[in-house]
Amino acid sequence: MDVLGLTFEGVLAAVKPAKPGHVPALREAYARAFRDADAAGPFTAQTHPLARTVQGGELVKFLQRLPDGFETESVIIPMSGYRTTWKTLCVSSQIGCARGCTFCETAQLGLLRQLSAGEIVGQVVAAQRELGAALRNIVFMGMGEPFDNFDNVIQAVRVLCDPAGLSFAKGHIAISTVGRIDGIRRLAALGWRRINLAVSLNAPNDEIRSQIMPINRTDPMPALREALAEYPLRKCQFIMIEYVLIPGVNDAREHALELAEYLRPIKCCVNVIPYNPRLDSPYEAANDEAARRFMTWVNDAGQFCKRRVTKGRDYMAACGQLGNRAFARRLTQTATTSPSGWPAIGIPLIAAPR
Ligand code: SF4
């Protein structure tokens, strides 16, 4: 049995052991399946062939080719703090994305398909077991909007946190949303107080946000702020507000002041991310000086703000840059003209970019 998408409880429900005395051995076999690709026993946790890795220093972007020809995309990011280093894995929850944010590479694919819970967990297992990464944190910031695949994402978190298996702490997992209000409320209703929530805001007002993020037309900023203000947080916990700084769009001093004012009722930290241009981007890259200036304005206005270090800019592995163009091209080509040598697969879009 492949246990990638199953908690140990789920496994027991499926296996129905004849005697309670069989449970410890099953538990050991369940844990072993995640650790050892060649584990003998009743369970496996099978990842898929690593189709490609791109490395820049310690940064590793990897793809797994799924049996139906689609590819997951994930990035292992080395992090460092005071006298300590660790690795964070950025996982995808969908292949492509329907949300159509104008600055985002993934949006160019449209939504191709949802990932199952097992395919999400499989990215973690591949990073740890096949690529040897000692992961501390997992962030749902790769391809896709996690709340557009809510049930599978939540099941994946359950599997990741199962003490019988991978045993990640919820406090080391962050789910990043485009700002889907019903998703934020559903996550809050689960009562998982330790899991971290990040919101891609990227604008100080509805006018700018609606231009760059179509979600804002259905989930506008005042309603989003209400949901965030009501989101239950622990004493030492903050909502992470992601702010991709785009030159000439959202980087002026009045934008910083308006942003700080908007966020006043929310316990949050703003992460400023200098824009990483996607391929054929209509926007330019933000430079360090612009980021520093913007952060100073926001901090001076009383809103805690820091900079997210951008890694992997040269490797299409940085924030907003996941989305495999070569794969997208293959979708529209015939087998004989495919430059990759892989057979083309006529996979329809579930939803085109909005
Ligand atoms: S930024 Fe996130 S939500 Fe927006 S299109 Fe890209 S992957 Fe989807």
Image: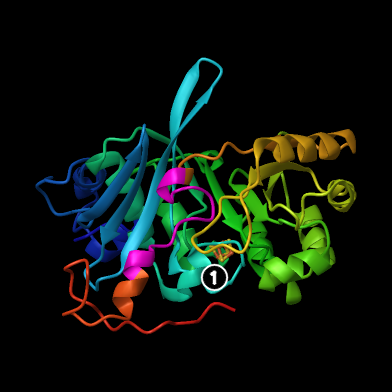
Which residue position holds label 1? 148
Q: What secondary structure do most residues of the magenta stretch adopt?
A: loop
Q: Position of residue 140 (x, y in %)?
A: 50, 53
Quarter of the image where ligand 1 sits: bottom right
Q: Is residue 214 above or below residue 172?
A: below
Looking at the picture, the colour scheme in use is rainbow
Task: Please report the residue visible at 90 percent of the width from the left and 38 percent of the height from the top.
Answer: 301
Which quarter of the figure has residue 148? bottom right
Q: Is 31 displayed left or right of 109 in the figure?
A: left
Q: Which residues are magenta?
A: 314-327
| Quadrant occupied by the N terminus | bottom left
Q: Position of residue 288 (x, y in %)?
A: 66, 36
Front-most of 351 and 148? 351
Q: In the rendered view, does 286 fall on the left or right side of 150?
A: right
Label 1 packing within 10 angstroms: few (<14), some (14-19), many (20+): some
Circle 1 sits in a helix, a strand or a loop, which is it?
helix
Compared to residue 345, the image places residue 182 above or below, namely above
Which of 50 and 148 lies nearest the eye of the viewer?
50
In the rendered image, the vertical position of residue 57 relative to residue 182, given as above or below: above
Measuring 19% from the left and 56% from the top, which residue is drawn there?
A: 49
Asked whether mark 1 and ligand 1 are closer than 8 Å, the reply comes as no
Which quadrant holds residue 287?
top right
